[in-house]
Image: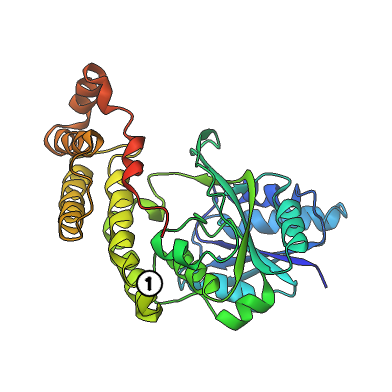
Amino acid sequence: MPKISVVIPVYNGEKTIQETIESVLAQTFTDFELIIIDDGSSDRTVEIIEEIIKKSIKENLDQRIRLYSFTNKGLSATRNRGIRRSSGDYIAFLDADDLWTPDKLASQYLALQNTPTAAVAYSGTSRIDEHSKILYDVPLANLRGNLYDYLLLRDIVGSGSNPLIERQALDEIGDFDESLWAAEDWDMWIKLSSKYEFIDVPLHQILYRQSPRSMSNKIGRQERETLKVINNAFAQAPTTLQYLKRYSLINVYICLTFKCLEESPNQQKGRKGIRLFIKLIIIALTSHIVILRRRITWKVFLRLIIVAIFPSKYVVKILNRWHQLYDLSSFFGNMINHP
């Protein structure tokens, strides 16, 4: 049996699936199986994968790839299907539009071997664009051990493409929640952290693709599903940690507000951003969390108003003249990162 099972869930991923598969086959750690679960794709995804498999078999290059196709049921169900068809002692998931650096599996596997108390290893993330160009590196969390408190506050792991997880831990925790259509990753990490320790690999090894079509850009659904995760998590959390819920909500609304200004903001996203910003301020005021005194908070609000009022072509002109509204990344300084 292979030491690691890599599961790629894919739905209509014809533009990126080949590059994603290649990033797995390029791993320096080679004792793995690659299980690809097609979730009812209607484009050339299956054809592309079958071509890769046929070429590998014909040229005797790689016998580790298996493809399964099913009717569409969503990301959580697709990952669960992959888990049930895997045989490795460890499991790693990779979304069909993300990539790994070649040392990802090796580094995480070594981290787990060197830390017997940990069941989950995770690395740093870099954001890439649709052409696989690195946009920026997400700051490293540099956290290890019992991370339950931290993961109740925010998703420090970042995406489903990140961790390497011991199979026995997944078996005990259970499946991804198939009722969730977003934030199912965070839900799983919270559950794992309630019983198991995490170990960090302080390297940026996950290349997370940002695109206008990604789930992370469906702000309304992201808000609803994330609130479900928070409510479910704190329904299970001990009384001593209930105070963290208001901080968790603050963090969620900071991230959602910022998403409305990422990539190609338009009037619709601007209006959504204002609604989210107002919710953020209400939570902050009722929780006595001071963010209103920070200039960056009002810079974000001003930019949201500009985006909501003016067409995109005028927004660009305004921001070109008002440079201090360009870089708003310090808005994340409002986030509560420690219990």
Task: Identify the residue shown where x is 33% and y is 61%.
Answer: 248
**Residue closest to the eye, 66 or 179:** 179
Task: Identify the residue shown where x is 53% and y is 49%.
Answer: 141
Q: Residue furthest right?
A: 60
| Residue 244, position as x, y percentages in the image | 34, 65
| Residue 285, position as x, y percentages in the image | 15, 55
Task: Identify the residue shown where x is 34% and y is 39%.
Answer: 262
Circle 1: is it few (<14), some (14-19), or many (20+) Cα within 10 Å? Answer: few
Residue 85 can be seen in this image: no
- Identify the coloring: rainbow
Q: Is residue 59 shown left or right of residue 104?
A: right
| Residue 333, position as x, y percentages in the image | 35, 42
**Residue closest to the eye, 316 or 162:** 162
Q: Which quadrant is home to the C terminus? A: bottom left
Q: Is residue 176 above or below residue 203?
A: below
Q: Is residue 302 shown left or right of residue 338?
A: left
